[in-house]
Image (spheres, coloured by chain):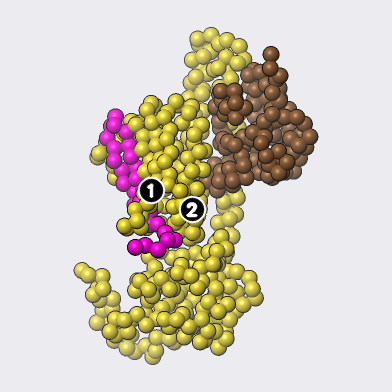
Amino acid sequence: MEKQKLILIAEDDPSVNRLITFKLGKEGFKVRSTSDGKEALKAALEEDIDAAIIDVMMPFLDGIQVLKRIRAEKPQLPVIILTVKSRGEDIHKALELGADQYMTKPFQTAELVKSLKSLLGEL
Amino acid sequence: MDKENKPIISSDGISILESVENLPNLLEQVSDCIYITDLERRIIFWNTACEKVTGYKAKEVLDKRCADDVLNHIDMAGNKICSTNLCPLYRAMAAGQSSEQPLIVKALHKNGSRIVVEVSVAPIRNKQGTVVGGMEIFRDISEKVDLEEQKARFFSALSHELKTPLTSMQGYLDLLLAGDAGDLNDIQKEFITTIHNQEQKLAGTIDELLEMARFESTDFSYESNLFDLSLTLENLANSFRADAAAKKLDYSVNIIPGLKMLGDRERLAQAFGNLISNAIKYTEKGFVSIEADYNRKNDMIRVAVSDSGIGIPEEDHKAVFEMFYRVENPGTRSKGGTGVGLYIVDRIVQRHNGMVELNSSPGKGSVFTVYLPGQNTEKKE
């Protein structure tokens, strides 16, 4: 059997965090759950993760900054930005900084899983 | 009646105007900043309001060009406008036409800071009708812009507060319905489906209310920057890819690269976002396509958003662009929502001197085509 993929979740809202953690667990992923930008960045850079799902508005460091720093060190890591921000400018900025996918909340859990799997080459 | 020949002063008015000692005196007294230049944009008149707002006394600027570090307009993104062919005064004098919409730019204050001003311009003609100079009227709207930014921050926070709980609700209902938390019996499934549907309606309404609030709070000011519309559309189209995939729609994007235009990128993204999200929302099977190209002959950019969705009957084609069309006509479309989306699209496109065309009939899908003036940097033949 293939090694379980480790997914980083950066989400400060506990119920959304638990939701994603639960769903990814069901789908056979291992989850590294974090609830602020600083903690997320540390985990992203120091741990052997396979992909990251990152919220934008988070304490200490926002998701866009986290994305920027991840891109500087791990240009290939699949990153999904998952946020309530739906302005064209926000989307533009995130994609320009190298997000692989931009999803707005509320989102469909099945779609998130699909995007993640497709970025990991599992679809 | 021909616009050029329209009398603008009644016969009574002429006698009143004749009794005005001189026009410059009158222009001196108004609270808007007014200055007049010759064809080389050398300043020949500078009123007191200009002095107050810019810090420059008339004697310091007369005979200088407004480009000589006097106003030196830049757009909101910081790009140079002054001394380029984007200078509003230059355009007005070259075209012999006044500006259609006031422009928001940043002018230089004597102390080096930048002031946000709303500018309108008009060419000045001599008795023979030849353009001999230009007049620019501007007013300081820095405070208004500050207020606008505060409002935008408020709506962004409000949006976050409203959508975070909805995200949880939708997500957990998704899990329950997918059986991720164990099997549901038929009644449980029915009830949870009902909650899910209602939650979706609520989410749609909140989206539109926030959209309307955001639109209204900033409607007075449009930025005018040169930007790459192709890039904006590509990014926007990509951000909807997952939504289209969720409904198994054939989603095609054909955008000619390098379409440059002058306008408010964020606003246009909002308009095209509305068109694309509508196309996906009202199409259950088939396709949604986004195309953009450029007509060199008339320097127009064409963006078409097509779908194979439910379509709109001919008699409603005008009404769909009216505000709250759907609220006042419940049941016109099965999906929830207040119907502000297309009103906003129309309004934004018009503010860019463009137009929206609709081709649609029930069951045959819809095509929304937007035409916008291009800003081709290449020389035209």
Disc 1/disc 2 C-alpha distance (Å) = 13 Å
| Residue B293, numbered label | 1
Is any part of residue B222 visible from this angle? Answer: no
| Residue B228, numbered label | 2
| Residue B27, numbered label | none
B305 w.r.t. B259: above or below: above
Expressed as whole percent of the image width and height from the top left, the position of residue B220 reads: 47, 58
Q: Which image quarter: residue A119? A: top right
Determine the secondary structure under disc 2: strand
Q: Chain of mark 1?
A: B
Nearer to the camera, B153 or A91: A91
The chain in brown:
A
Q: Is residue B363 magenta?
A: yes
Quarter of the image with the C terminus of chain A is: top right
B15 w.r.t. A3: above or below: below
| Magenta span of residues | B354-381
Callout 2 crowding tier (Cα within 10 Å): few <14, some 14–19, many ≥20 = some
Q: Colour of chain B?
A: yellow
